[in-house]
Image (cartoon, helix red, strand yellow):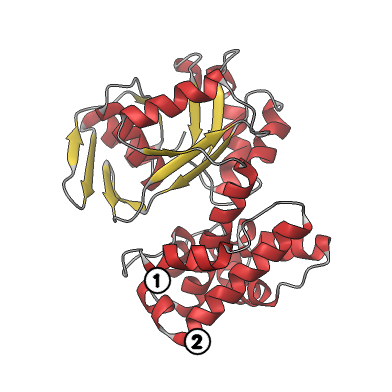
Amino acid sequence: MGAGGLGGYFGARLALAGEQVVFIARGRQLEALRARGLRVDADGGGFELGPQPATDDPATVGPVAAVVIAVKAWQVAEAARAIAPLLGPETCVIPFQNGVEAADDLARVLGPEPVVAGVAKVVSLLAGPGHIRHLGGPTSVAIAELDNRPSPRVERVRDAFRRAGIEVETPADIQAALWEKFLFVASAGGVGAVTRAPIGVSRALPETRRLLERAMGEIRDVADARGVALPKDVVARTMAFVDALPPAGTASLQRDIALGRPSELEWWSGAVVRMGREAGVATPVHAFIYYSLLPSELRARGKLEY
């Protein structure tokens, strides 16, 4: 559900491996998928797929083994309502959003039974209709039941990703894994958006590197207050991950803000500020990021003119 940089990339890799994949898309991307298929550019070699099964109406597909939710965070509730015809008794609904609230948003619409947790790590973007660009760096997924219990339906989906050549992580605590990714993406994306610099610059300048570390520390503290057990060295580990990324990398929020498009600001730094306030944890860096970017966000959504 959603065939942009993330959904298009993972869907293409699964289809290339022989899995039965249907893309739920719309507009020019839907037209391209049907007419030409998908082209994936990647370091070390890309690939092309011919015309793909694609539709804008999930009701035409019928029950499936798994639904990957690859839309933006603000579209999750709408996507949940749309995918009801895809659900069978053992269907997994896997949210791959950059945040920690998507599973709850899905469960409010679908009930808790079909919803599992998903963490996707990939730097990719939609370069044009039917054209995905993978920018390099580590690529993996983690998929688990929300309470971490062993699950045959989850293992079947993990196996499909493994067959597609995608690394599958199996964290002991999927909630901690969700928050660890959130700690990275909300901090790097927020700092990148306010500085308008790629990750290579943000990590190299001592001043912005410290800003990154402080932003990560705030999320660690909020997670701790909410009972999420992140590793004690999570900030150092995440900075090591940042140091291994391609220097030209940018987060989706940063790109959306720069292009004047609606972004996931409310679900990234906005969520850190809100959850910090609820938990009694100070989040001054994320408050600065959120308040600084809010005018651009409101303008992109047609709620403010200037």
Image position, residue 288 (x, y; %)? 64, 77
Of residue 178 and residue 58, the one placed in the foreground of this image is 178
Image position, residue 187 (x, y; %)? 55, 67
In what element is the residue under mark 2? helix
- Establish if 194 lies above or below 5: below
- Please name the residue that numbered disc 2 is placed on: 207
Hey, which quadrant is residue 199 in on the image?
Answer: bottom left
Hey, which quadrant is residue 114 in on the image?
Answer: top right
- Name which residue lies at 39% across and 65% down: 250
- Name which residue lies at 46% across and 21% down: 156
- Establish if 189 lies above or below 60: below
Of residue 160 and residue 300, the one placed in the foreground of this image is 160
Residue contact between numbered discs 2 and 1, judged by CB atoms under 8 Å: no
- What is the crowding at mark 2: few (fewer than 14 residues within 10 Å), some, or many (at least 20)? few
The residue type indicated by label 2 comes to: Glu
Image position, residue 27 (x, y; %)? 38, 39
- What is the crowding at mark 1: few (fewer than 14 residues within 10 Å), some, or many (at least 20)? many
The residue type indicated by label 1 comes to: Ile
Which badge, 2 or 1, is on the more N-terminal residue? 1
- Please name the residue that numbered disc 1 is placed on: 199
Image position, residue 47 (x, y; %)? 18, 39
In what element is the residue under mark 1? helix
- Name which residue lies at 69% across and 39% down: 104
Of residue 240 and residue 96, the one placed in the foreground of this image is 240
- Name which residue lies at 68% across and 59% down: 271
Q: Is residue 305 visible?
A: no
Q: Is residue 218 left or right of residue 260?
A: right
Position of the C terminus, as image quadrant, is bottom right
